[in-house]
Image (cartoon, rainbow, N blue to C red):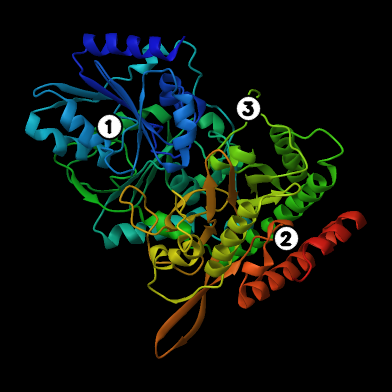
Amino acid sequence: MMIKTRIEELRELMKQKNIYAYIIPSADYHQSEYVGEYFKSRQFMSGFTGSAGTLVVTLDEAGLWTDGRYFIQADSELSGSNITLFKMGEEGVPTVEKYLVEKMPKDSTLGFDGKVIGAKEGENLEKQLEFKNITIEYNYDLVDHIWKERTSLPDKKAFLLGTEYTGASFSEKLSRVRCAMKEKGATAHIITSLDDIAWIFNIRGGDIKSNPVVLSYAVIGLDNVYLFIDENKLNDEIKSELHKENVYIKPYSEVYDFIKSINNDEKVLLDPAKVSYAIYRNIPKGVQKIESTNPTILFKAMKNEVELKNIRNSHIKDGVAFTKFMYWLKTNVEKIKITEMSATEKLEQFRREQDKFIEPSFSTIAAYKEHAAMMHYSATKESDYTLEPKDLFLVDSGGQYYDGTTDITRTIALGSISQEAQTHFTNVLRGMIRLSKAKFLHGCRGYNLDILARGPLWDTGIDYKCGTGHGIGFVLNVHESPNGFRWRVVPDRDDSCVLEEGMVTTNEPGVYIEGSHGIRIENELVVRKAEKNEYGQFMDFEVVTFAPIDLDAVDKTLLLKDEKEYLNKYHKEVYNKIAPFLNDEEREWLKEYTREI
């Protein structure tokens, strides 16, 4: 069925329900960034395959909003669909809310599935549209009536992550949550975000590709816990852990009726940015809501010493896999046929050879030449380039291991590259090094430090339309709030917190020249304490990613002395940590690619 036909079918359903405009976001019932196949309604209705975007369909127009990572991709994928692309953050481009305020007639109805729209977003729409007396109808999943071949909800088995990995038991984490609840005066805490639930219960699963979480809801009381989940996913080991506390296991879909039955004397803690509009609206009016960030967001972001030890170990394995891949690629690009897709498969093969590997932590971005200008490019059979012994090849990838989650990007010169590309590569490298070397007082946030990464690019009038880095989960989501690097605060993104000890954040500046090339270099950084003196507590970063940075793409004349020293020291560490796990040929190659410059 063509996209235009689907949109017209949706409009017919909207007319039947007296709905003027209908919103289809990219979320699932838990406001997840990445979603399972069942929840890809926006992709089904628009044809746009990026992970972030919102489709709005009115009775006579359709528009899709997405961010700078996807402008090129969305422009291509929406071609011929009659869906207008709205480039978020660009000058003169309205937000979804402003668009609806302008387009919706007075006394009309806005529709959406309240289970996939966040409470905060839903409330904002209410306020923005109140002056037009707009009715909000949130009980209809209209796409479900059109999507005849929609898949079922996933049924993958869950597994318990032991304290040898997590460093804290379910009981210990539950106690921390209850202490935070008491501090806020709450008697119950509704949690719907899957990574928060996975972290508390030490449960992992396979319900979302590359995100080892399990579809579930939790309501934590001061002396009991309700876990809404498909019980068939739980093995005896998990149930044994849950029975140590007063945990009641309920069917996944019963959460809405349960919420409606909460007693009026309860004081419920919830995060409006994390719970759905439907959950929020189902809470009885007499129940006091304590609206605040989930305490687990900060708890899980600040990794403990056991988690950090495991993270370091997982990165050595991941570095070995990537180094083997880079050696294979560099030595075979002229000898055998290698494509973007076959290179992706080869890299995954090297990762699967590593101990405790589970799955990739996201879909690998393997982008040759101008494909790399699309930040989140994904090769298809139609677009799959064959690699040649020239130009740049960007590979952004990562792995889920039982002992950590990794995310690494390297841009590799497959042969000769232009002077422009070499200059861009070197300035990206300079920015990455400058941020890695940062020393700062406690209290700094990512936006205080972001200019260190962007500076060498800004000096030449170049920028990149995304953040410089994001938080990383522990055997969890590869994108995790609340830490990050970004040059300004973006209200919709929770990534501007104070950088605390134990937080893991990526450092990934880049250059993206449409129609030509894309460059990104990415390492992960752990926030740690440095000295404390009369000026306060100083902080710095520990780098945990170890793989060679391609010296073939570096213009050494552009590097400052301290940048050369840093790169040489880093490459020495790469060799010492990775070489013991390589064969003789790989080791000799690594020695050459980590040489001092």
Quarter occupied by residue 533: bottom left
Q: Earlier in the sequence, mark 1 or mark 3?
A: 1
Q: Position of residue 353 (x, y in %)?
A: 79, 45
Quarter occupied by residue 107: top left
Q: Nearer the viewer, residue 584 or 194?
A: 584
- Which numbered disc covers residue 390? none
Q: Is residue 348 left or right of residue 177?
A: right
Q: Which residue is mark 3?
A: 383
Question: Regarding mark 3 in the picture, which secondary structure is present there?
Answer: loop
Q: Nearer the viewer, mark 1 or mark 3?
A: 3
- Which numbered disc covers residue 551? 2
Q: Earlier in the sequence, mark 3 or mark 2?
A: 3
461 relative to 515, above or below: below
Q: Position of residue 592 (x, y in %)?
A: 83, 62
Q: Position of residue 33 (x, y in %)?
A: 44, 40
Q: Nearer the viewer, mark 1 or mark 2?
A: 2
Q: Nearer the viewer, residue 529 or 20?
A: 20
What's the amino acid at mark 2?
Leu
Q: Residue at x 41, y 55 (%)?
A: 296
What's the amino acid at mark 1?
Ala
